[in-house]
Amino acid sequence: MKKIGITGSYMSGLESMDEIFACYGFPVFQADLCIKFLLNWREDILREARIQFGTDIMQHGFIQPHKFASTDKFNRLLSLIDIDLQMIWLQFLEKHKKSKLVFFKSHIIYERKWYAPYSSIQEPFSFDKVIYVHRPVDKRVPLISRSLNISQTEARNLALQAYSERDKISKSDYIINAFDNLSLLTQFESIKYMLLEKDQSDLLHT
């Protein structure tokens, strides 16, 4: 089994990959959805979050992400669920241990330093390869603006505050461009072939 991280900035096209994974039947761990569940439905985690950050982080019973503007504060929040997330991920890996490829999908793989050799937590977040889904800032700004119902100026400022796309690209093993004429499916098919190539080669020599 190969553990593959797949990530992308907000509105980069990462969510569009779900349909492609479904076509191939690859198991995909939806890390961001898991994080939202842990933060909003685990009372022990909510209680600790209220102790550390105050009750004003809540609205209608849910944690409000915009209350965590600073990266440091947001990382402190996510550190509350790291162990639980690891345990769920390990259970997912065990369930799909016969799969040749298992994907870990999250927008914040690099922000959380989950990818070795950059990871401070070598296991279980040590992916064999990472794929980055890329869409330039200029093409993401109008999408962010519509999605969050904010001005394009605000959307651009929000996009530029995020982790450097240049750094993400340089650290990634494969890039999928969600803005050119080559389909996501065609690009993924090429990457899939390279990911499985070693396994196929090993079979020929056994």
Image (spheres, rainbow, N blue to C red):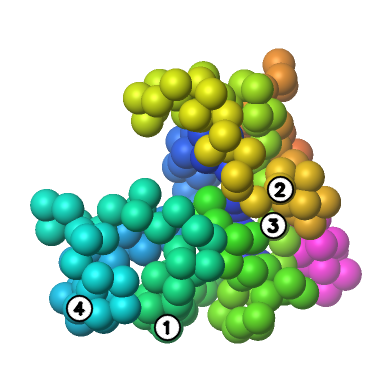
Q: Are marks 3 and 1 in contact (CB under 8 Å)?
A: no
- State the mark number for residue 83: 1
- State the mark number for residue 152: none
Q: Residue at the location (61% across, 70% down)? A: 114
The residue tagged 4 is 47
Tell me the kind of residue under disc 1: Ile
Task: Report crowding for label 4: few under 14, some 14 to 19, many 20 or more residues within 10 A (C-alpha).
Answer: few
- State the mark number for residue 164: 2
Disc nearest the viewer among 3 and 2: 2
Task: Report crowding for label 1: few under 14, some 14 to 19, many 20 or more residues within 10 A (C-alpha).
Answer: few
Q: Which secondary structure dominates the residues rendered in magenta? A: helix
Between the residue at mark 2 and the residue at mark 1, the CA separation in whole angstroms equals: 27 Å
Q: Residue at the location (51% across, 29% down)? A: 155
Q: Secondary structure at mark 3?
A: strand
- State the mark number for residue 130: 3
Is 56 displayed left or right of 10 in the figure? left
Q: Residue at the location (59% across, 74% down)? A: 125
Q: Is residue 17 visible?
A: no
Between the residue at mark 3 and the residue at mark 2, the CA separation in whole angstroms equals: 16 Å
Residue 107, x across and y down, in percent? 53, 51
In the rendered image, the quadrant that contains the C terminus is: bottom right
Residue 39, x across and y down, in percent? 29, 66
Task: Compare marks 1 and 4 and give the one earlier in the sequence.
Answer: 4
Between the residue at mark 4 and the residue at mark 2, the CA separation in whole angstroms equals: 33 Å
Is residue 7 shown in magenta? no
Task: Compare marks 3 and 2 and give the one earlier in the sequence.
Answer: 3
